[in-house]
Amino acid sequence: MNDIKIALWEGLKATFERDEIDTLAFSLGIRPDEIAGDTLSARAQSLIIYCANRGRLSELLVRCKEERDHYDWPRIEPPSWVAYLQRLPEGWGMPDRVVINRQTFTLGRAPQCDLAIKAPEHVDCYVSRNHAVIRQLDEGFKVFNDQSKRGTFVNSLPVDEEGTDLRSGDIITLGGPVASDQVFGCRFTLEPLPPTA
């Protein structure tokens, strides 16, 4: 675990009881059976790892501060880069550039998706309503296939249930390994933020 995770783990052990870890998890929409361990220490560690793997560490930290505001919780520094999805030259279904502005960023045809993909008219589009999710983790970004039967791909390789780490320049396709009239494609890009004065 990195320094922030260790400090969070120590804070959970110092301020919460074992059963309160389950209540904290439930308040985040996490079922207690999704957290491993029998002891306070093990359950706290499992909750931290669960949240970190899903890009929800900041959310856990905010909830801890709300529940135990007397404790000196660690700070998570804001990122020094901006991530966005860029339409491919032959692409369709999205603006030229869409900033990934949430820790959990959804892609699909459903209007409530963060990137609501519009299929071309008269085309049998292979993109599902809730197709993929990009999560911002402590170490970077990861894409997961959500509810798609046709799959999500990064650089033509299928994304498995563990997700795929994203690097600047990676091509993400939804519905098949290569962008086409029916398969949506975009480029993942990271750029450093300009320095603040």
Image (cartoon, grey):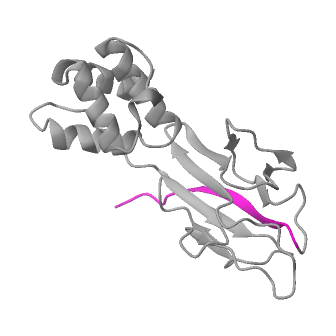
Q: Position of residue 64 (x, y in %)?
A: 23, 37
| Front one among 63 and 37 | 37
Quick check: can you spot residue 72?
Answer: yes
Q: Is residue 120 left or right of residue 139?
A: right
Q: In the picture shown, does residue 66 fall above or below 50?
A: below
> At 90% across and 70% down in the image, what residue appears?
180
Q: Quadrant of the N terminus?
A: top left
Front-most of residues 75 and 122: 122
Q: Residue at x 82, y 60 (%)?
A: 175
User: In which quarter of the view is residue 148 placed?
Assistant: bottom right
Image quarter hosting the C terminus: bottom left
Q: Which residues are magenta?
A: 182-197
As drawn, is 81 to the left or to the right of 76?
A: right
Find residue 84 and report its horizontal and vertical position in percent: 61, 62
In the image shown, does 134 or 35 lie closer to the viewer? Answer: 35
Residue lying at the far left in this picture: please name it. 70
Vertical arrangement, residue 176 with respect to residue 77, above or below: below
